[in-house]
Image (tube, coloured by chain):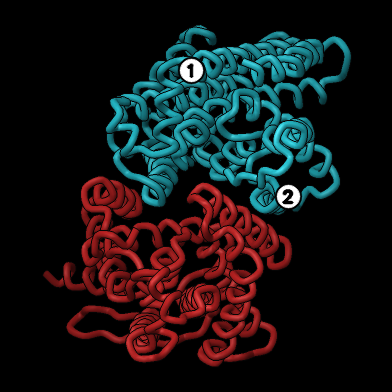
Amino acid sequence: MQAYIQVLTNGLMLGALYACIAVGFSLVWGVLNIINMMHGSLIILGGYLTFFGWFHLKINPLIMLLIVPPFLFLFGYVLQYVMINRVIARPVLATLTLTFGLDMILYNFMNVVFEATPRRITMDFGSFSFYDVVLPGDRLLAMVLAFALTGILYWVMRTSRIGRAIVAVRMDKDAAALMGIPINRVYAVTFAISAMMAGVCGVLMAVTFPVTTNISGLLLGKAFAVCVIGGLGSVPGALVGGLALGLIESLSGNWWGPQNAVLTGSVLMIILLMTRPTGLLGKAGYE
Amino acid sequence: MNSLRYGLLWFIPLAILLALAPFISNNYIVQQATFVCMYAALALSWNFIGGYTGYPSFSTSAFVGFGAYAGALLQNAGMPMVLAWVFATIFTGIFAACLGFAILRMKGHYFAIGSISIVEIVRLIAASWSSLTGGGEGLNLPIFRGGPEHAGMVFLYSFLVLMLLAVITTVIVDRSRLGFGLRCIEQNEDAADMVGVNVNASKISAFVLSAIFCGTAGAISASWVSYISPPDAFSIVMTLKVPVMAMLGGAGTIFGPVLGALVFVGIEQSVLSRFLDYNQAILGLIIVFLIFFLPGGLLRISLFQKLKQRITKPSTPEVKS
């Protein structure tokens, strides 16, 4: 019993991070109808910026949380406006190949500039334990921040003008355009928000895990799985999907050994894709 | 008919030139010619599902890796090399048929994601099933005897034959009912179903066709390199490169993938030797250029076609594909 509570706690902490990884990816897929293959590399970019800010300039990673995401917001806005907006109406093959190609460029650039050595911020956040269930401080902090920032995003999407515009465009872009919503700007802001959430996730990753360019594909795989499990384009969907994937990987790692945890997640994703492609919280007609 | 004849006009000299490579140049050129043949075969096979049927498949690496492992295991079990290639092809075909039943129900983005995940899943299985596949350490194959020049020639001709087989299959499919059905599915799947195209059987046939040449190519290249490991066999770069080559030449045309492979290998080699650290960035730049400036591929935007268009229909606006 004790062991299971520990496993479930680990799963929840992992799941919060997964939700944070996927929420931006899901938003872009749902609203722009584009699979952003760059998402993993954007997270790594955020992670590297945080690491180098801490290593060379001695900036606390929590302060970097105020610097890195806005930078990525800008990066995403420009990228979408200059590049991706031009192909937005083209078939999946074109858009996916383009973002895949941009990912290759970013990945290569990071490999050359930062080098692929795994780096990790070595700060001691202590650890807490309740009744023998151990909670490492860094992961707990990452979980709380992931929940808080995802919550803020949800609140922004629900209440702000731009948030409502994004939801409107996702539901019916022609009708939204007729209501006077500037579609191209909404697309750019959506992509920018997605890149910003990748930046947030990068900061949290840098605090809890070693950051290296080699895991960008792995992160992207997590984003796929969370979207398929939770459903596309909504914050609650990403949250549910992320927590579900975290718990599944944690439990299956406990049962069948950690080397098969990722495999279980991927196989489950394929089965869900075949049987229920709209996800647990998804609604039909958004794809 | 016309486009076939026009294509043969440059394809036959190209094939002869590739076949003569060992006699007129050095080992480096022979190796590049082998790469051209291999990538042309891979791009032609992707063309069945990605070009004709219009399904964004990114599972090329899964089939290449599957074929490589099947060939390697059979060869290590004592089977003669060529026989191992044949059986690896058959196994890859069966694997693709089973997979096709599962993932061809999906469409659009979901199919793309599913096909990429297949590569990931097969790679994870190959990496963790160490008792069969050697896990992360990889597998060694018996080294081909007879010295590098002889081996270079043998593998060049193997890939050349594979490429010719792929071209012949493409021509046959292009003119058959199957090819017609696949083009209908590309235009509108529901309408194709309504007018009596057997959609599921056609899609699965296209998927299997797109896999078998990949399987052979994987098995041959495993014998060529005589060592395979999961990250090499199931390379994520390969799974992107092959569709890009096909699109570069012209997806859904007979000779487009061959032209794309030739041009791609040419660019890669001429740039790679100068900027070793930047090979992925080069692939990325080619993609950006391709998507923005060559949406239909080289064959569709050729000077010849533009001239023809201008002569026959001067006032028609350009139709986007």
Q: Which residue is mark 1?
A: B173
Residue under label 2: B282
Q: Which chain does the residue under circle 1 lie in? A: B
Q: Earlier in the sequence, mark 2 or mark 1?
A: 1
Location of the N terminus of chain A by quadrant is bottom left
Q: Considering depth in this image, is A68 or B255 the residue closer to the camera? A: B255
**Residue A206 in view of the camera:** no
Name the quadrant containing residue A142.
Answer: bottom left
Compared with residue A104, is residue B312 higher up or lower down, i.e. above or below? Answer: above
Is A145 located above or below residue A286 in the figure? below
Report the Cα–Cα distance between label 2 and label 1: 33 Å
Q: Residue at x 49, y 78 (%)?
A: A193
Query: Quadrant location of residue A161?
Result: bottom left
Horizontal placement of B220 versus B270: left or right? left
Q: Position of residue A146 (x, y in %)?
A: 38, 81
In the image, A184 versus B96, the foreground residue is A184
Where residue B209 appears, as percent x and y from the top left, is 45, 22
Q: Chain of mark 2?
A: B
